[in-house]
C-alpha cells in the first residue's frame, strides 16, 4: 500500500471528480422527482420496448441490419394498432366510458376490469380505448396544420429571397 502522498492524481482533480459525481447524482434525483408523475408512463414505454425487442431485431435483420427502416416499420405497426383500436372502439370497449357507477369505484385490475376503475366507477380500459380517438385526431390535426403552415412559410420565404437571376 502506498502512502497518501504517492497518489498520482492531485487533490483538485479528485475534488472535481467528486463534485461531478455529486452533481450528476443530484440531476438524476431531481429529474426523478420532477418526472415522478410520468414515471408510470416511462415504465410502460420501457416494458413495450423490452417486450418488442426480439421482434425489432428480426425486422432489423430482414432489412439487412439497418435499424432506421426497422424502427419505421415498428412505429407504423404501433400506429396501425392504435388506429384500428380507435376505429373499432365501440366494439372493443365493453362499457360506456362516461357511465358513472359509484358501486364499482376504485376496483383493482381483474378478469372483469382489465385496467380497473377510477374514483367514479368508470372503466379505465374503455376510457383508454376511446381516448385513443381524441389523441389521434389531435395528433393528426397538429401535424397537418404544421405541414401546411411550414409549406406556406417556406414558399413565401423562397419567393421573397430569390435572386433576380432565378
Image: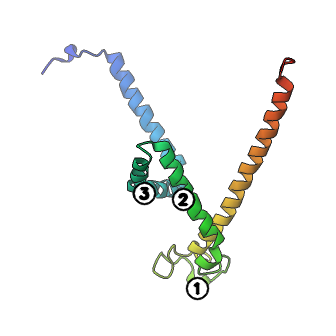
Q: Give the mark, 3 or 2, whose residue is nearer the N terminus.
A: 3
The residue pinned by badge 2 equals 78
- Tell me where residue 118 sits by quadrant: bottom right
Q: Are marks 1 and 3 in contact (CB under 8 Å)?
A: no
Q: What element carries label 2?
A: helix
> Foreground mark, 2 or 1?
2
The one of 14 and 98 positioned closer to us in this rendering: 98
The residue pinned by badge 3 equals 52
Residue 110 image position (x, y, % from top left): 46, 78
Kindly identify the residue that appears in the image at 54 percent across and 58 percent down: 77
Q: Are marks 2 and 1 in contact (CB under 8 Å)?
A: no
Kindly identify the residue that appears in the image at 42 percent across and 57 percent down: 52
Q: What element carries label 1?
A: helix
Q: Give the mark, 1 or 3, whose residue is nearer the N terminus.
A: 3
Q: Residue furthest bottom?
A: 103
Q: Give the mark, 2 or 1, whose residue is nearer the N terminus.
A: 2
Count of numbered labels shown in the rendering: 3
Q: Which colour scheme is used?
A: rainbow
The one of 130 and 153 positioned closer to us in this rendering: 153
The residue pinned by badge 1 equals 103
Q: Is any part of residue 7 visible from this angle?
A: yes
Spatial distance from mark 2 to mark 1, Cα to Cα? Answer: 35 Å
Kindly identify the residue that appears in the image at 67 percent across and 80 percent down: 99
Kindly identify the residue that appears in the image at 58 percent across and 85 percent down: 103
The one of 140 and 76 positioned closer to us in this rendering: 76
Residue 129 image position (x, y, % from top left): 60, 70
Spatial distance from mark 3 to mark 2, Cα to Cα? Answer: 11 Å
Amino acid at each position: 500500500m502506498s502512502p497518501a502522498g504517492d497518489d498520482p492524481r492531485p487533490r483538485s482533480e479528485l475534488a472535481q471528480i467528486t463534485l461531478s459525481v455529486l452533481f450528476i447524482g443530484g440531476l438524476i434525483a431531481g429529474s426523478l422527482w420532477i418526472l415522478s408523475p410520468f414515471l408510470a408512463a416511462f415504465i410502460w414505454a420501457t416494458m413495450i420496448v423490452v417486450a418488442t425487442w426480439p421482434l425489432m431485431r428480426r425486422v432489423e435483420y430482414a432489412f439487412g441490419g439497418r435499424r432506421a427502416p426497422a424502427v419505421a416499420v415498428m412505429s407504423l405497426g404501433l400506429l396501425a394498432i392504435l388506429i384500428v383500436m380507435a376505429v373499432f372502439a365501440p366494439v372493443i370497449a365493453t362499457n360506456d366510458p362516461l357511465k358513472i357507477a359509484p358501486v364499482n369505484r376504485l376496483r383493482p385490475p381483474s378478469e372483469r376490469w382489465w385496467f380497473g376503475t377510477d374514483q367514479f366507477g368508470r372503466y379505465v380500459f374503455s376510457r383508454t380505448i376511446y381516448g385513443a380517438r381524441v389523441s389521434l385526431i389531435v395528433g393528426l390535426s397538429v401535424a397537418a396544420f404544421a405541414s401546411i403552415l411550414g409549406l406556406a412559410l417556406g414558399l413565401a420565404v423562397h419567393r421573397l429571397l430569390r435572386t433576380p437571376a432565378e
